[in-house]
Amino acid sequence: KVASSDPVKVYNYKYKKCLDFIEQNYDPLKRSKAISLKESFK
């Protein structure tokens, strides 16, 4: 669980969730973009 006291962490967490969704539901080109974006958020 993400500590809600840190808005940046919460945002990153939600953003990653969104990218996970894209990975699972969109075409390979969008997926590869989402994956590389997610890597930069680690």
Image (spheres, helix red, strand yellow):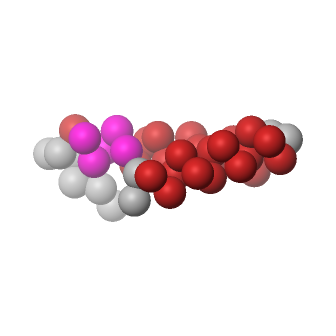
Estimate the x, y position of residue 11 in percent, counting from the top left.
34, 39
**Residue at the right extreme?**
27
Determine the image quadrant of residue 22.
Answer: top right
**Quarter holding the N terminus?**
bottom left
Q: Residue at x 50, y 57 (%)?
A: 39
Q: Nearer the viewer, residue 29 or 21?
A: 29
| Residue 28 part of the magenta-drawn span | no
Determine the image quadrant of residue 34.
Answer: top right
Q: Residue at x 31, y 44 (%)?
A: 10
**Quarter holding the C terminus?**
bottom left
Left or right for 24, reference 3: right
Estimate the x, y position of residue 25 in percent, counting from the top left.
79, 43
Q: Residue at x 47, y 40 (%)?
A: 15
Left or right for 42, reference 18: left
Rendered view: 36 above or below 30: below
Q: Work out whether residue 27 can be spotted.
A: yes
Q: Work out whether residue 17 can be spotted.
A: no
Estimate the x, y position of residue 28 in percent, counting from the top left.
83, 47
Q: How many marks?
A: 0
Dominant secondary structure of the magenta stretch? helix
Q: Nearer the viewer, residue 13 or 41?
A: 41
Magenta residues, start to end: 8-12
| Residue 10 part of the magenta-drawn span | yes
